Amino acid sequence: ADAARVPALVIGTGYGGSVAALRLAQAGVDVHMIEMGMAWDTPGPDGKIFANTTKPDQRSYWLRTRTKQPLSNFLGFPIDKDIPRYTGILDAEEMGGIIVYQGRGVGGGSLVNGGMAVTPRRENFGAVLPSVNADEMYDVYYPRANSGLGVATVDPAWFDSVDCYQYARVGRKHAQRSGFPFVFVPDVYDWDYMKKEAAGTVPKSALDGEILYGNNYGKKSLQKTYIAQARDTGRVTISPLHKVTSVSPASGGGYTVVIDQLNTSGDTTATKSVTADRVFFAAGSVGTSKLLTRLKATGALPGLNGEIGKGWGDNGNVMCGRANHLWDPTGKVQSSIPCGGIDNWAAGGAFAEVAPLPTGIETYASFYLSITKTPHRAEFSWNAGAGRVDLNWQTAWKQTSIDAAKTIFDKINAKEGTIYRTDLFGTYKIWGDHLTYHPLGGAVLDKATDNYGRLHGYSGLYVIDGALIPGNTSVNPFVTITALAERNIEKIIATDL
Ligand code: FDA
């Protein structure tokens, strides 16, 4: 073990961690970021950094020997396949009856996600983060986050003309014919690049179905935005394939952070320890919650309060497909980047993204990911016998989300004379209710921490990621995670350093 000492250590390189690192570095603080996943900066044998969605390989999954595709079946046939165990990019973590998908690598979820960058409607914000001043968020921090992330909206004229958004135009038509508002959803994908993909003048990414396992071109992941800027300060170092296993008070002040170095099979090849004056937990909702729950229960950080591990939700995620008539084809080539949604939040508690089904063939299917209003919150707890953290999620809780999604799709099906697809999540199974892409909560703002993410019980320990947000954001979460991190780090820099 080396005796290194750092002023600020950030656990994880997703949205919260990247904002913290950039702003601390700009304030003159040296930052060490620890990331359990890979760097994702080196091409594989096929010349590309990331695997294509239609051809998953070892790069695609975090330490699994078989793929775990969110759409497990097609035309009723299972499509998962064996792959070598490797520190790949997408973690399908099975916890208490729900599969929680998460990104692994430098950039966290920004590597694998759809880039949909949605600011909640102002009238919904009070329910998202009740203790936060909404005026400040909408005047300062949401604009700062949107600009830092490079958020933009599709050119509506291009949208109306291009083959790759045929599926979204069908989605819009069906929504509007049933009286639902269709809204364009902003994204961090470079829309000019996508136009060039459609014109055939650049290598394709969104138009080659890339998503979930990384985008080789066009998507402005954190590696290209916050993390690039952070590196440019010269004050930020990043250690990929390093996993934090413990944080505890150090005898001479600050915190001892214990870190396992991993190889690409996931084995520990070395264990190191670093002393840090301040530690920022940015391991994602599940990563941060699991770490804090274990450290509290096993005596490393016994002074954390009773809110640790509580208030975890799935953002009400549920997926479904509809079978269209033959006169409503959705297109052979579909952009993997969604750009529109159906907003029925006020009336039915559901916001449904019109999602692609980029199979390369005409499917006559419309596919949707709904974010729904859900009251259900699970709790992480330490299972001493098994030596792991458990989550007490109840599979039956998804019924609330299905009911909310049905306020949209039952009506559209009735109007169009269509039915649900039953072949995408199993045989004769309509709802993709086994997963979430949007884990939130577990170390909730103003409960486990103060109103700026300072953990109760320990000065110099902070939470700065999705674990702060109590379970439901009414839209996709990363803009809110980024904006909240911008707000909190500004306060922390002004008052704690
Ligand atoms: P995030 O999960 O991004 O980062 C945490 C990082 O910490 C990870 O890189 C992890 O490897 C690392 N880590 C964990 N434990 C560690 C440890 N002990 N030591 C070291 N490192 C550790 N959202 C949205 O707004 N729009 C969208 O379109 C989508 N789409 C989408 C698709 C898919 C497939 C997924 C999986 C997710 C989305 N999301 C999304 C969700 C979004 O990506 C997610 O909310 C954010 O990435 C969460 O940001 P955080 O900063 O909380 O953690």
Image (cartoon, rainbow, N blue to C red):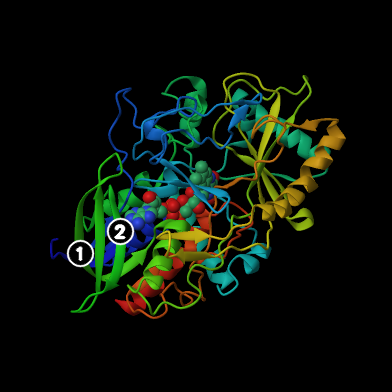
**Which quarter of the picture shows residue 166?**
top right
Name the foreground residue: 362 vs 126: 362
Name the spot of residue 360 as percent of width and height, x first.
Answer: 57, 20
In the rendered image, the quadrant that contains the C terminus is bottom left
Q: Which of marks 2 and 1 precedes in the sequence?
A: 2
Report the residue that reaches farthest toward the left.
2
Q: Please tell me whether residue 242 is drawn above or below residue 365 in the rendered image.
A: below
Q: Given the image, on which type of amino acid does mark 2 rest?
A: Val
Q: Please tell me whether residue 228 is drawn above or below residue 248 in the rendered image.
A: above
Q: Please tell me whether residue 129 is drawn above or below residue 223 in the rendered image.
A: below
Tally the numbered discs.
Answer: 2
Note whether residue 116 is visible: no
Name the spot of residue 66 as percent of width and height, x first.
Answer: 45, 33
Q: Please give the residue where the numbered disc 1 appears in the rendered image.
A: 274
Q: Residue at x 42, y 57 (%)?
A: 287
In the rendered image, the quadrant that contains the N terminus is bottom left
Q: Is mark 2 within 8 Å of ligand 1?
A: yes
**Which quarter of the picture shows residue 321?**
top right
Q: Residue at x 60, y 72 (%)?
A: 130
Is 259 left, or right, of 214 in this rendering? left
Q: Which mark is residue 244?
A: 2
Is there a contact, CB below 8 Å, between mark 1 and mark 2? no
Name the spot of residue 189 as percent of width and height, x first.
Answer: 48, 39
